[in-house]
Image: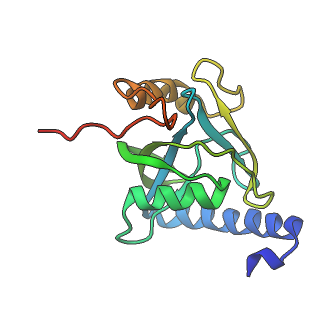
């Protein structure tokens, strides 16, 4: 239904809603739970996006989790909604605690691989592109810039891309 709203009006609505949400978080300080997606391509580059609201910085795709929602399922959904990309061999890589506008934010970091080309929807996402760990964009949060190469390494060590599919296999089960 939201696709019936013209894109510029939709982006303006997102900015207003986000400003209200930030004030609510600052005032109420709720405990939030979300996911961030490290979608890697066959070259090991990571997919980053820029949102039309909030921070204009490059970030991994992601979003909030519904109560009781599985973080990996949420990451797959968010990546598809925001970029049109499928996420194969998705798995939980890390759990990060951070503050978000005064609220506690528990972020499930999910990693997986995609063979798809991202498409920014022009509404929530205004840019989407792959970046090598040693060529990250300048305009991104400092803490993310510091951690991202380590997460990419942790995601890919021991999981080289499969020659047939170009995708890294899932990790071996732990004994």
- In the rendered structure, the answer to whether residue 122 lies left or right of residue 79 reads right
* Residue drawn 48% across the image and 55% down it: 75
* Residue drawn 53% across the image and 30% down it: 143
Quarter of the C terminus within the rendering: top left
* Residue drawn 54% across the image and 28% down it: 44
Instruction: Determine which quarter of the picture holds residue 158.
Output: top left
Residues 45 and 124: in front is 45
- In the rendered structure, the answer to whether residue 152 lies left or right of residue 5 reads left
Instruction: Indicate the colouring scheme.
Output: rainbow
In the picture as drawn, the residue positioned furthest to the left comes out as 175
* Residue drawn 69% across the image and 47% down it: 118
Q: Is residue 141 above or below residue 12?
A: above
How many marks are shown on the rendered structure? 0
In the picture as drawn, the residue positioned furthest to the top comes out as 134
- In the rendered structure, the answer to whether residue 2 lies left or right of residue 8 reads left
Instruction: Determine which quarter of the picture holds residue 104.
Output: bottom left
Quarter of the N terminus within the rendering: bottom right
In the picture as drawn, the residue positioned furthest to the front comes out as 164
Q: Is residue 116 above or below residue 145?
A: below
Residues 87 and 126: in front is 87
- In the rendered structure, the answer to whether residue 2 lies left or right of residue 68 reads right
- Can you give x and y, in whole percent of width and height, for residue 141 in the image? 61, 34
- Can you give x and y, in whole percent of width and height, for residue 122 in the image? 81, 57
- Can you give x and y, in whole percent of width and height, for residue 39 in the image? 54, 41
Residues 170 and 54: in front is 170
- Can you give x and y, in whole percent of width and height, for residue 138 in the image? 71, 25
In the picture as drawn, the residue positioned furthest to the bottom comes out as 1
């Amino acid at each position: 239904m939201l696709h019936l709203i013209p894109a510029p009006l939709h982006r303006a609505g997102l900015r207003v809603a986000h400003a209200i949400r930030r004030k609510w978080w600052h005032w109420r300080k709720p405990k939030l739970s979300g996911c961030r997606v490290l979608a890697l391509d066959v070259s090991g580059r990571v997919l980053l996006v820029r949102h039309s609201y909030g921070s204009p910085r490059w970030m991994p795709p992601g979003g909030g989790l519904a109560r009781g929602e599985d973080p990996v399922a949420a990451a797959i959904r968010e990546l598809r909604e925001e970029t049109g990309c499928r996420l194969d061999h998705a798995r939980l890589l890390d759990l990060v605690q951070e503050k978000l506008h005064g609220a506690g934010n528990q972020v499930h970091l999910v990693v997986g691989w995609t063979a798809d080309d991202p498409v920014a929807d022009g509404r929530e996402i205004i840019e989407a592109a792959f970046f090598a760990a040693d060529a990250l964009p300048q305009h991104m949060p400092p803490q993310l810039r510091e951690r991202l190469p380590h997460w990419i390494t942790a995601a890919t060590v021991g999981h080289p891309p499969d020659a047939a599919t170009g995708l890294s296999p899932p990790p071996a089960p732990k004994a």
